[in-house]
Image (cartoon, rainbow, N blue to C red):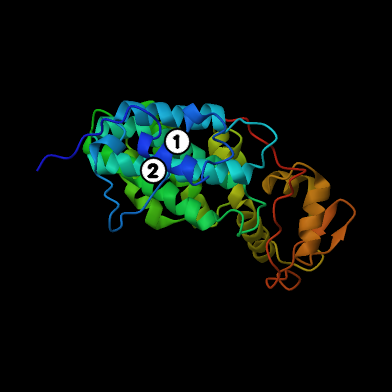
Amino acid sequence: MLPVKGICMEMCPKEETIMRKSKKLVHRLECDPHKMVKCFSRSAAGNLLSKPHILRPPSVLKNTISYLLNEILTIPNIPFNIIYDFIDDRLNSIKQDATIQEVSNQEWMAILPPIIRFRAYAAYKCYEYDVNTFDPIINLKHFHESIFKIVRIFLEDSDKSTDELCFEMVSLLIVTNLGDYNVLQPALPFITKKSTLIKKAVLLSLSIMNGNFGHLFEIYNTLPAMHQCVISVQLPMLRRKILKSMCMGFNCKNNYFAISILTKILLHNKVQETIKECQHYCLTVIGDKVELSKSLFNNEVDEVMLDSKSRDIFDLNV
């Protein structure tokens, strides 16, 4: 049986537009009545999602993604969590339309990358939000669903597995899950490709897995901004591991380590941030040095969260 093909050439089907206007369900970001965007909806009795006149063909889906990420994402003076919730729902609707129509791999490769970049950026941008405002687990789940799908497509299409988009997506998957072998394993077939970016990502993940944290400082600043974003979200966990590991490795009474060097290793911008982190884990700081001692390191305290005043804000073209 052939899949149904959409014939709706608007971002939002007319019947949904009429219904939402009549029930006052128009979102505040849909101030232009001619630019409403189809909501995500679940299949239920009396709600058939495969009707051609409510499905948007791939060309309309791509135009809708462009509208969401170039016009809605950049709206000023609106809290980002409101923008995120709106775009999140509409992107889910786009993926739903594409899935129902069983679009080709070529069309998926045009649809998925901007969605993946948006979710990677949102994880960074919404880092400080309360879980009731932004759920990082659900966002990461959607990120993985999309990026694993595109990685599978690259594995099936050897001609596409050597282009820059493939290198970007595979390396982004790896650095989003540093030290996770279950994520690294599906990416291993791409190591043979002539991609410096993939090789850096694999080396960094393996280094984190094996406790060799020196490569973090060496590689981080050579990566694209999007990759730095997803690594930044993991820094609290990584910094804790690094400090704990160094306390084990350098453990010796009255053995002091230079704060300036530790600042670079932990990817802090200022020595004051490093001092604060060390003191948080109950390490003794004397002048410009810290005593690295496994007996002093407090493993019971929470990780030190990223400081919004010290972290970079990336201007990303998702």
Earlier along the polypeptide chain: callout 2 or callout 1?
Answer: 1
Residue 32 falls left or right of residue 63: right
Residue 156 falls left or right of residue 211: left
Query: What numbered label is drawn on residue 210?
Result: none
Residue 180, by quadrant, is bottom left
Question: Which of the two marks, 2 or 1, is nearer to us in this view?
Answer: 1
Tell me if residue 76 can be seen: yes
Question: Mark 2 highlights which residue?
Answer: 93
Q: Where does the N terminus fall, quadrant-wise?
A: top left
Q: Position of residue 213 (x, y in %)?
A: 59, 51
Residue 10 falls left or right of residue 176: left
251 shown above or below 75 = below
Query: What numbered label is drawn on residue 37?
Result: 1
**Circle 2: is it few (<14), some (14-19), or many (20+) Cα within 10 Å?**
many
Q: Nearer the viewer, residue 150 or 69?
A: 69
Q: Nearer the viewer, residue 193 or 123?
A: 123
Residue 152 falls left or right of residue 121: left
Q: Are marks 2 and 1 in contact (CB under 8 Å)?
A: yes
